[in-house]
Image (cartoon, grey):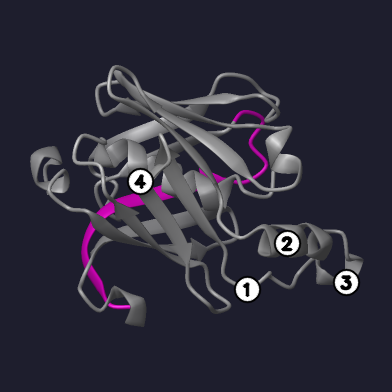
Amino acid sequence: MDNAQLQTHDRFGVRQKTTLMANQYVVTTARPDASAGSDGEVVAFAQQKRMALKEQVTLYTDESKDRVLCTFEADQVLDIGAVYTVRDEEGNPIGSFRKKSVASLLRSTWVLEQPGTMELAGRERNLLVAVLRRVWEFIPVTDFVPFIWPYHFDFTEGGKRLMAFDKKFGLRDRYVLDIAAPALDRRLAIAQAVALDALQSR
């Protein structure tokens, strides 16, 4: 699927695949029954190396990894205050995102920017779930037990929701990404969606 076709889609499914050396994410177009776990065409495949000093993730157009869809990379080694620049397959910047450290102490908050078009503020929808997630992370015996309760993010501009990222209930990380902004670059939105899982515990 080329970028022009990708831009016509407003809903995507995201699922994580866990391997020994990397976290992998498969992004598909979402069928009408996406809530039931039905995936459409694969549009992106992301791979995140574990224990990397500086975060860098490549998103390919599919699992063959023959063609790059986009990349995102931190501008510094430390995650605190890092800005992640998203670039197209030729290395040209198409936008960025960053986590707001202070606001995220209670409820994870992100800023997604597409220069000349929009700047979206994204944060966890449910404050209670956000607090429970933080309590869960501090319990030693839960190190290898995932927090299975769904959490969701809303990205807004001027109080209007333009993007939503909803986690589905279950042991495996599965999400639905909904976009209500025609001008938002789908590559940028997909990169942010992957980061919401890959970087969420940081």
Decide which of tag 1 and tag 4 comes sooner along the chain: 1
Disc 3 target residue:
141
Tell me the SS state at disc 3: helix
The Cα atoms of the two marked residues, 3 and 4, are separated by 33 Å
- The magenta stretch is 37-54
Looking at the image, which is closer to me, 146 or 67? 146
Question: Which marked residue is nearer to the observer: mark 1 or mark 4?
Answer: 1
Disc 1 target residue:
149
Q: Are marks 1 and 2 in contact (CB under 8 Å)?
A: yes
The Cα atoms of the two marked residues, 1 and 2, are separated by 9 Å
Question: Which marked residue is nearer to the observer: mark 3 or mark 4?
Answer: 4
Q: What's the residue type where badge 4 is placed?
A: Ile
The residue lying at 30 percent from left, 44 percent from top is: 60
Disc 2 target residue:
133
Decide which of tag 3 and tag 1 comes sooner along the chain: 3
The residue lying at 80 percent from left, 65 percent from top is: 136
